[in-house]
Amino acid sequence: MTYCVGILVRDGLVMLADTRTNAGLDNIATFRKLHLYQTEGERAIAVATAGNLAVSQSVLNILTEGLENPETGRIETIHTIPSMFKVAQFVGRAIREVYRIHGQSMEQQAASFDVTMLLGGQVKGGRLRLFMIYPAGNFIEATTDTPYLQIGEHKYGKPILDRAVTSDTALYEALKLGLVSMDSTLRSNLGVGMPIDIAAIRRDDLRFEISRRVDDGDEYFASLRERWSAALRAAHQAIPNPPYDKP
């Protein structure tokens, strides 16, 4: 299990991902699920992955090593494609290529071809965008009405985002809310675990303003967790008890 979230706001984009992978209760490992591709001043792109680790890694390898464009015959990579929409299409093609190679044999072994990705970033000349890409290679895009997208174990972290995030939320406020969303998921699902990888891109800056791993010793995240818990306790205690006396 995993939890990844992307939040697209007026000022920029925030991406967060945990790092836990489970192959049983006694086999827990840490793998990076948030991958950054940057050519400063030209493009800054982040890809977060959920699902089968072998499938995800195969897709990521194609993104960097390249895939032939059937129209031009040229080898394309995530570093050469000229727009974010075309990058989303390229990631979808990479997923379908991995399925073409491995899908049938995985199904014969009763293994699930399960991969979902968040793709966010900006290429010079285009706008900052955020997509969710499905196992079939198709995708949806975040909008001003729905400024965040989640993959993996999303239900525990969704309520805070629904209540607090809008397209006008400031960039670092969005990062804070993303961390609260991650903390809610960490507390409720053992399949999601530390450390957390975070990244932030300011609109039209074409570089990662933040690229950081948050581990158990991070003072800010520890303070955020305690303050959020205390604020929730104070909030429910401040609400009057229900006036439902016995008839």
Image (cartoon, rainbow, N blue to C red):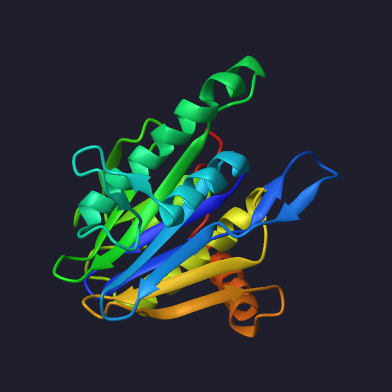
Q: Looking at the image, which residue is at 55% across and 56% down?
A: 33
Spot occupied by residue 4 in the image (x, y as percentages of width and height)? 49, 54
Residue 155 % position (x, y): 49, 44
Relative depth, front residue between 132 and 216: 132
Q: Residue furthest left?
A: 125
Q: Is residue 38 left or right of residue 192?
A: left
Q: Residue at x 58, y 26 (%)?
A: 112
Instruction: State whether residue 62 appears in this view.
Output: yes
100 relative to 109 in the view: left or right: left
Taking the image as shown, residue 212 lies to the left or right of residue 84, namely right
Residue drawn 58% across and 54% down?
Answer: 185
Residue 206, located in which quarter of the rendered image?
bottom left
In the picture, which quadrant includes the N terminus?
Answer: top right
The answer to whether 13 is drawn above or below residue 149 in the figure is below
Q: Is residue 154 visible?
A: no
Q: Position of residue 224 (x, y in %)?
A: 57, 76
Q: Is residue 20 above or below residue 206?
A: above
Q: Residue furthest top?
A: 108
Q: Quadrant of residue 51?
A: top right
Relative to the observer, which residue lies in front, 16 or 39?
Answer: 39
Image quadrant of residue 11?
A: bottom left
Q: Residue at x 65, y 18 (%)?
A: 110
* Placement of 71 over or under 105, stated as above or below: below
Residue 210: image location, x then y, percent: 44, 80
Residue 12 drawn above or below residue 92: below
